[in-house]
Image: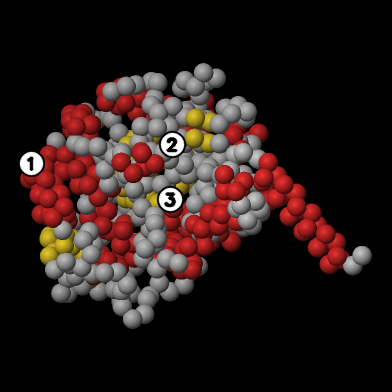
């Protein structure tokens, strides 16, 4: 029998067996009522998200990131021009659009360098750290990401002169092998520094945090996509190596606690921060949180203003932040946006006289230099980016992060899938992207007539609140908290009316 005969026989057998199975099974009504043909419904459902972004949706309609923003990241990663022809595609009258106010006499850019005034974390500590790029890599754990992805990120920040966060999953050999500067994130799971019962282990922490590559440490209270819930690593992603690094079993999903056992109030958090600083040998220590108002950050600010210890930096994660897997109820309805969080934190720290003693780092759906510059103008000293760097690694927003079937080899532990991600090639793209975001920020700085990113303020921006109506950002986010609270009510009324 010729080869095509065998192929027809196989297809016919598969059709008959599949039809009989569908008629007998009771789990799927569509497949039982429409045997074999009903299977295509599930195939199309699975292929829908990755295909819509190419053949259905416009450049501006997709979420969480439009094709326009993904394209910017792809071009930047490849070192290609990010200019666009024929004008902007963004509706200039769309509510929520933030516009910069260009200076009539910009800062000359001929022969200008993109150097900025370094941002010093922990200037009064024994081991301060100077940051020389506006944007750096946010927390993405080994386990959530493949070893090739982590290695590419670490190599990339080494090439660029930036840093990356370890994510909650602790510092892996691939973070270290890449040679880039690292921030060690300590989450409620205490991965890398835990006892068997999940409590904190001083000696294990000292061993990890004492490494030369670790430049700072921060405590994760919550992340934007799922505040109030710990991280989840499906057991399908837990390899023997990951289990050893984290100190967890392999036979069940890894659920991080939603809070730290070591403290349950602001003073307890600050004591824990101070404890980590001592164990790390005097490196800068901070914490990461999601705001729901001003109360918590005011308690922190009051302590910082009156003491010389406490956090050296605060990472604010907006409710629009991302993760591999988050409950919809938390992702959609818990926490406030990065823009509002930065304005609140900056205001409160200034009111309490603590702003000069602590740095703010913003994180949440930042991809382009314009996004970063807006965050700086609202009060951030630096920004962290996660998904933008994933685009540089090849992410196509297939929305498979939580399945271990990431087609680009980034968010998977499948050896077959991760083999497609070449760490050497992707590390250069990470480097290019980090420089591109920084260059874009500096370009905006000069267009505003300024010299350094730290000079960007709310007065340099305005927001479209309804078609034909533009309001200065100092009115929407005033520097007085009393005015701020009143404006929030007005702004909600404006948007509901629009």
- Residue furthest out toward the top: 197
Q: Please, is residue 496 above or below residue 172 in the view?
A: below
Dot 3: what SS? loop
Dot 1: what SS? helix
Tell me the residue that label 2 is attached to.
Answer: 185
- Residue furthest out toward the right: 1
Q: Please, is residue 200 above or below residue 425 in the view?
A: above
Residue 105: image location, x then y, percent? 17, 74
Q: Which of marks 2 and 3 is nearer the N terminus?
A: 2
Q: Which of marks 2 and 1 is nearer the N terminus?
A: 2
For the N terminus, the image quarter is bottom right
Say how the picture is coloured. secondary structure
Give the residue drawn at x 16%, y 54%: 495
Q: In this view, does 348 lie to the left or right of 122?
A: left
Quarter of the rendering containing residue 262: top left
Question: In the image shown, does 416 or 279 lie closer to the viewer?
Answer: 416
Q: Is residue 249 left or right of residue 106?
A: right
Give the residue drawn at x 62%, y 30%: 250
For label 1, count other residues whose C-alpha is less than 10 Å away and answer few (under 14), some (14-19) or many (20+): few
Quarter of the rendering containing residue 61: bottom left
Tell me the residue that label 1 is attached to.
Answer: 482
Residue 21: image location, x then y, percent? 70, 44
């Amino acid at each position: 029998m010729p080869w095509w005969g065998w192929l027809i026989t196989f297809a016919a057998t598969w059709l008959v067996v599949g039809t009989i199975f569908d008629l007998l099974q009771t789990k799927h009504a569509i497949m039982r009522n429409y045997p074999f043909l009903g299977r295509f419904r599930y195939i199309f459902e699975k292929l829908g998200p990755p295909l819509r972004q190419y053949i259905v949706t416009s450049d501006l309609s997709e979420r969480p990131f439009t094709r326009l923003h993904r394209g910017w990241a792809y071009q930047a990663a490849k070192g290609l021009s990010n200019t666009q022809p024929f004008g902007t595609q963004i509706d200039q009258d769309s509510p929520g659009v933030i516009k910069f106010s260009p200076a009539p006499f910009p800062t000359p850019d001929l022969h200008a360098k993109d150097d900025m005034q370094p941002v010093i974390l922990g200037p009064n500590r024994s081991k301060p750290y100077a940051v020389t790029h506006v944007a750096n890599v946010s927390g993405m754990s080994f386990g959530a990401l493949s070893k090739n992805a982590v290695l590419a990120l670490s190599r990339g920040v080494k090439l660029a002169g930036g840093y990356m966060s370890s994510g909650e999953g602790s510092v892996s050999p691939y973070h270290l092998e890449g040679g880039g500067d690292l921030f060690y994130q300590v989450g409620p799971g205490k991965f890398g520094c835990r006892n068997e019962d999940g409590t904190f282990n001083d000696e294990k922490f000292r061993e990890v945090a004492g490494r030369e590559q670790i430049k700072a440490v921060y405590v994760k209270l919550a992340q934007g996509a799922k505040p109030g819930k710990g991280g989840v690593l499906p057991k399908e992603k837990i390899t023997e190596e990951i289990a050893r690094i984290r100190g967890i079993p392999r036979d069940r999903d890894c659920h991080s606690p939603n809070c730290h056992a070591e403290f349950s109030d602001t003073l307890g958090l600050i004591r824990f921060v101070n404890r980590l600083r001592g164990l790390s040998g005097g490196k800068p220590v901070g914490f990461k949180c999601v705001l729901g108002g001003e109360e918590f950050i005011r308690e922190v600010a009051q302590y910082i203003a009156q003491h010389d210890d406490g956090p050296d930096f605060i990472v604010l994660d907006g409710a629009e932040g991302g993760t591999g897997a988050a409950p919809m109820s938390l992702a959609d309805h818990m926490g406030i946006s990065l823009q509002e969080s930065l304005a609140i934190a900056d205001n409160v720290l200034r009111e309490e006289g603590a702003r000069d003693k602590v740095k703010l780092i913003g994180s949440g759906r930042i991809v382009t230099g314009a996004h970063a510059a807006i965050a700086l103008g609202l009060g951030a000293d630096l920004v962290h980016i996660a998904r933008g760097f994933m685009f540089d690694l090849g992410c196509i927003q297939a929305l498979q992060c939580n399945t271990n079937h990431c087609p680009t080899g980034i968010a998977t532990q499948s050896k077959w899938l991760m083999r497609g991600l070449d760490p050497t090639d992707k590390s250069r793209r990470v480097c290019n992207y980090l420089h591109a975001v920084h260059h874009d920020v500096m370009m905006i700085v000069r267009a505003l007539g300024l010299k350094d990113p730290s000079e960007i303020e709310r007065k340099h921006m305005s927001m479209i609140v309804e078609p034909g109506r533009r309001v200065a950002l100092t009115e929407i986010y005033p520097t007085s908290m009393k005015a701020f609270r009143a404006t929030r009510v007005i702004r909600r009324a404006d948007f509901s009316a629009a």
